[in-house]
Image: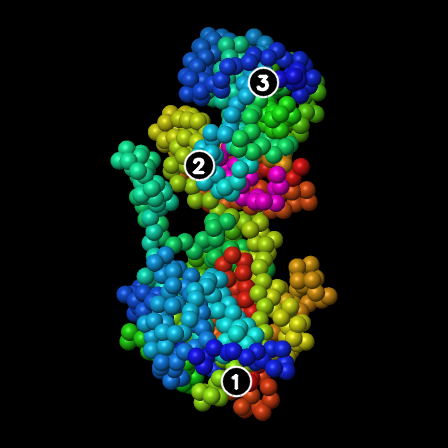
Amino acid sequence: MAARSSTPAKGSPLRDAVVIGGNRIPFARAGKAYADASNQDLLTAALEGLVARFGLQGEVLGEVVGGAVLKHSRDFNLVRECVLGSSLSPATPAYDMQQACATGLEAAIAITNKIKLGQADSGVAVGTDTISDAPIAVSDGLRRALLEASHAKTLQARLRAFAKLRPADLKPAAPGIDEPRTGLSMGEHQAVTTARWGITREAQDEIAYRSHTNLARTWDEGFFDDLVTPFRGLTRDDNLRPDTSLEKLGTLKPVFGKSLGPGEATMTAGNSTPLTDGASAVLLGTREWAAEHDLPVLARFVDAETAGVDFVHGRDGLLLAPAHAVPRLLARNGLTLADIDFFEIHEAFASTVLTTLAAWEDADYCRDELGLDGPLGTVDRDKINVNGSSLATGHPFAATGGRIIATAAKLVAQRAAETGKPARALISVCAAGGLGATALLESA
Amino acid sequence: MIVTPTTTDGAALDVDVLPVMPGLAALYAKGAASSGRLAAGRAIPGRGAEDSPALTLPTVAHEVDGLATAGLRSHLRDYQRLLHEPGSELLPSGYLHVLAFPLATSVMVRGDYPLPLIGTVHVANDASLLRPVALGDVLDVRAWAERLRPHRRGVQLDVVAEIRTGGELAWRGVSTYLSRGYALPEPRPDDATAPDAAAPVVEDRAPEGTWAPPLPTGRWVLPAGTGRAYGAISGDRNPIHLSAMAAKAFGFPRAIAHGMYTAARALAEVGPARGETYRWTVTFGKPVLLPGTVDVAITQEDAGFAYTAWHAGRRQRHFRGEVTPL
């Protein structure tokens, strides 16, 4: 069991956890290329691609961790099932976890913490989601009747359970992307945040345009050649619109915030991320484990910070939690925004990026909500999502973290190789429930 | 009960102790019959509202003592599910309103109650939960009508309900009703300064579409069966809440949601920050048509929470109120 670390780290209390590489399948628009594929199919494909890429067949890894956001109850051990369906040794343990859109990043945080503590030498952070094969459940009313009937001892009691059913109870319940406590969809929540921060339609379309052109360039440059495995005939993210333009984006009608009043509806299908199918995996380990397996090291997984915001009664925006996490992460590591070479800010919506940046530039917000002395600062736009992000790739919830970690790790490795100096990347992922996860990577 | 009941203004009330909590269905039947009688009395040609005999409220409180709540577990659970209340053993203020509502209604269908039940509009509610009431507590409930006063569209009055546990006042709810087309012969001079007269009715009378709603914090998608679901739990099966056809008979285009359902849902969505004791107020505006979508803003204010709900498309306010920890 070489993968299990039995000796605690000596000297420094914590060991380095490093990103060795990543693999994902191209992300597909809902109901298209992966319409017939399950979460297990998608994740097994991404994991198996990682195994093939790094020669991990028969290997016992410390742990495989991750999950899916839209998950059927039968998939309680989804990640373990994918491990058993892969070429990894069945002795590799696994567990499922979920933190909405931050699932993939949180999985990497969990594994790297074990690696740093000496509880594991290697691991894979995974995430998958399919909107095409989303679980459909029975209504609460039918579910309660079925459960009550199954517990009933007599025919009479069983009939009594069903007598409570109403016609509406027979309607199936599709998985919601509405916030349970507010009933507002994520888009409607972000529309409120967008209006409150006065983010313009033009600024949002500009973000979307850059996301598509940057991603198209990145594919053309071959950046993803060692990060993506084709699946079901798809070789590139099919949401990518290489030929989009600001003019085309400008013609789209608003889809969110339409009831907020004149001029407030600025979020379109072009500057909002569509629901997508896909899966990703990131290989993590110690430097020693990588060396023993003759594998490269892209970046050090330095530190991470999560946050939650009080959005239920509108004190903060639903997707602004990363704005809270990042200043704490920077301060703990003695860094400022100026020390960061690459900002990977997940584009749930173009305006999510823009409201996060606006928050960091706002003296009142930074003082009252973030507890800072003044504005956190301004981010150089040319350092943000330089190889495209979710607006162009699409966003299969739990798979996004893995996509971003692999891209960021490769970016800092390339930059360090070019300049001979350390390079840093900051990852920020917002999530449903007013959650956010952030992480700091540094060239190894 | 030991405490002698008096109205808010200090007038003594007789007490009529009922053996059990009356059933709402029978009360509605009685209310419909007396409404017909009252309407017939007013329909005599040549007699306008101004010529009506002076309206006086009965000076009697109805009381039911020893109301057990131990058997209400599944009823409470159904209420909690419908209103999005947590599955606690503590009875929310809206649930106590439901428990006291039949007794309050029984006052409004007394033979000497001067106004018809049918056509009476619930315009505001103000309930204070002064001590936590838990499932299993035994309740003494009392209700009476008071403070009959003029309103620009008729007359207003309050129906007060009180719930005591262990002899101590635990909950007090004041429901304000409007009866259109009635008038008091000589408005009392102090009415102009009464709280109701000072309420910002002008704002609520703003022409359609001119009121600018705040940014929403939530959205309720209310299915067509919302009125039937709350009717089944509260016992308030007023036909205007149950079906579009019945509602049309009373002049509404579709069935309308119970005002207390919407207010109790807002109370639930304030969440645990309301504490175990709180004051909960609501003023009703345009009714919520079913099925329907309601935008709400529930926001923290200095003393507690304020809430407003509106129809997003038509920019009409449905109701607003406050929840203040006590």
Q: Chain of mark 3?
A: B
Taking the spot 58% from the left edge, 57% from the top edge, the residue there is: A309
The image position of residue B61, as x and y in percent, is: 58, 15
Residues drawn in magenta: B260-276
In the picture, the disc for residue A287 is 1
Taking the spot 62% from the left edge, 25% from the top edge, the residue there is: B166
Q: Give SS at disc 1.
A: helix
Quadrant of image for the N terminus of chain A: bottom left
Separation of disc 1 and disc 3 at Cα? Answer: 79 Å
Q: Choose between B232 and B152: the one closer to the eye.
A: B232
Q: Earlier in the sequence, mark 2 or mark 3?
A: 2
In the picture, the disc for residue B144 is 3
For residue B72, say whether it is visible: yes
The image position of residue A213, as x and y in percent, is: 44, 77
In the picture shown, does residue B326 fall above or below A103? Answer: above
Specify the amino acid type for callout 1.
Answer: Arg
Q: Main secondary structure of the magenta part?
A: helix
Instruction: Check contact, mark 1 vs mark 3: CB within 8 A.
Output: no
In magenta stretch: residue B272: yes
Q: Chain of mark 1?
A: A
Q: Which is more foreground, mark 1 or mark 3?
A: 1
Taking the spot 31% from the left edge, 43% from the top edge, the residue there is: A150
Q: Which residue is mark 2?
A: B78
